[in-house]
Amino acid sequence: MTHSFQLTHPERETSPVRLVVSHRGKIWRKATGISVNTKLYNPKGKTVRSRFKDLAVSEELTAIENRLLQREKPLMSFQEVEEAITYGLGGGVAVVPTARPTFWEYFREFAERECPSKKWRANAYRVASSFMGKKDDWEEIDGDWHFRLDALMKKAGYSLNYISTITSKVRTVMHEGEIRGYHSNAAYKSFPRRYETSDTVYLDRGEMEDLWELDLTDETERKARDLFFLGYYTAARFQNYSKLSLDNISGGKIRFIQPKTGGEVVMPCAPRVMEILQRWGGKAPVLTEQAINRALKSICKKAGFTSKVQTRITKGGKTVISTHEKWELISTHTARRSGATNLYLEGVPIRICRFLTGHKDDATFLKYIKVSREEGADLLAKADFFK
């Protein structure tokens, strides 16, 4: 077993000191609860006293070192090493029980849980661990740690929303760890939330009618269009509307559970929903999401949705502006956004719209829908205030 003391943040004026223990290829990094003025630190020092020139600090660290040496012996097991570390850090220094998982161990377990967001959790674990190297533990996931991860993700060219999603998963892991008593590090609570409103599109009621009336001979395109309309009339996520069947309908209402939130959704059943389900044997037609997205672009191009649309996205810390024809931006998710936006424009209260979409608050819903200034003015004109 070998050990050393290192500065957690050597770039700062004052830095916490951590204990680093190595044994048979495994490394433990533990907070000592001691801080030192970094000007009084000599990285080339061979002993605790020569490395840490603050007398009080060197005495405390020497005491920890002596306790470690008391427990050191040849051929130690990992459990014995952990017990020695716990003993060494005693004497008033708060030590989290060694039975706890490390931050990265817990993050991996979090990423492997079966849940609707498993893909995003796995992505977050993969990206964060590849950039940060699985070296830091709970107490070291602080503002500087996030700043370095954020900078590396920007350098890799990730979009702002993707970076924010990774950060949100780190925050969730830290929050769960705090609740379970694995750490008391609250720095994660200040990690920024910086999602930007997506410049995606929606189809208005006129465009939806044009799409419905379009004469299609290809079966894949007909299936894709019918699935799109199921998404439009339910304002649901693809994982919901692609599994819709007559079993979800009773008393003229559609009922299903949202896997992402666990909330129940109840809504009127539009006549076209019944027509579509009956057309395909009582359930939604089956197509992969990739096949639907390809077909939708072809269909919407045939429908003449060729107006120019500018998109704006932050990638690698820079704003990237692109111009597309509208059909190029249509996907399965456009159905949900179109349904939600058209409901809102018809004057349905936001609280009722959210019953369908599952958004947690009004602000999130309003960011999600796509309403132009002209449409907003038309909506205001319906109010008695302007009459």
Image: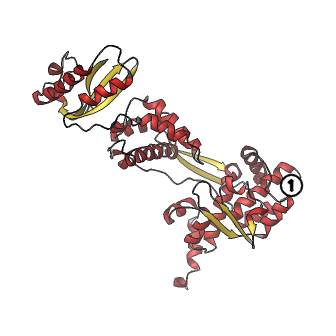
State which quarter of the image contains the C terminus. bottom right
Is residue 335 or residue 243 the one in the foreground?
243
Image coords of residue 373 (percent x, y): 55, 66
Residue found 75% across the figure and 48% down from its top: 292
State which quarter of the image contains the N terminus. top left
- Residue 162 against residue 357 in the figure, above or below: above
Which residue is denoted by mark 1 in the rendering?
A: 216
Quick one: SS at disc 1? loop
Is residue 20 or residue 100 the one in the foreground?
100
Label 1: how many Cα within 10 Å (few below 14, some 14–19, many 20+)? some
Furthest residue in direction right, as rendered? 217
Query: Tag 1: residue type?
Result: Leu
Image coords of residue 33 (percent x, y): 23, 36
- Residue 131 against residue 164 in the figure, above or below: above
- Residue 47 against residue 15 in the figure, above or below: above
Residue found 26% across the figure and 21% down from its top: 71
Asked whether, in this view, residue 103 is left or right of residue 323, the answer is left
